[in-house]
Image (spheres, rainbow, N blue to C red):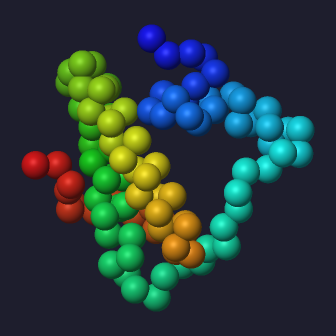
Amino acid sequence: MGSPFEGPSDPTELAHFFVFQQIAKGQLPAVFPFAPSADPSASAEFNAVLSDLLRSLQQAWTQDPAKIGNAVQQMIILKGKGRTLIQNGVRPDFKWTEDTQLH
């Protein structure tokens, strides 16, 4: 079992509460400049994972609560894809798509 001080997916990252506490104290995390991409496909994978996440949440809430684990996994994947885009200067689109990353 993890510590309340650790993030849920990476024990080297602080949990949300402690990140917010650092921000409140003026200890800001790394900041990256980012903007919308001229290439509409730049956020395609991010948008597919986001859409899968929303579909999984809908399934968990309306059909099978046990599927919440799928949504949590997609949250972790989405975080990685979003972080990569931002570190590369690209703002994620946050657009719904019928595309899927689920197989």
The image shows residue 37, relative to residue 72, as above or below, that is: below
Q: Nearer the viewer, residue 61 or 6?
A: 6
Could you tell me residue 61's position as x and y percent?
31, 25
- Tell me: 61 left or right of 101: right
Q: Is residue 62 visible?
A: no
Residue furthest out toward the top: 1
- Tell me: 16 left or right of 55: right
Residue furthest out toward the bottom: 38
Q: Nearer the viewer, residue 86 or 68?
A: 86
Q: Nearer the viewer, residue 52 or 81?
A: 81
- Tell me: 102 left or right of 25: left
Could you tell me residue 42's position as x and y percent?
38, 76
Q: Nearer the viewer, residue 64 or 17?
A: 17
- Tell me: 15 left or right of 66: right
Could you tell me residue 75's position as x and y percent?
40, 41
- Specify the quadrant of the image occupied by residue 74: top left
Residue furthest out toward the front: 12
The image shows residue 84, relative to residue 90, as above or below, that is: above
Residue at 48% across / 34% down in the picture?
A: 10
Could you tell me residue 20's position as x and y percent?
74, 36
- Specify the quadrant of the image occupied by residue 99: bottom left
- Specify the quadrant of the image occupied by residue 46: bottom left
Residue at 49% across / 82% down in the picture?
A: 37
Residue furthest out toward the left: 103
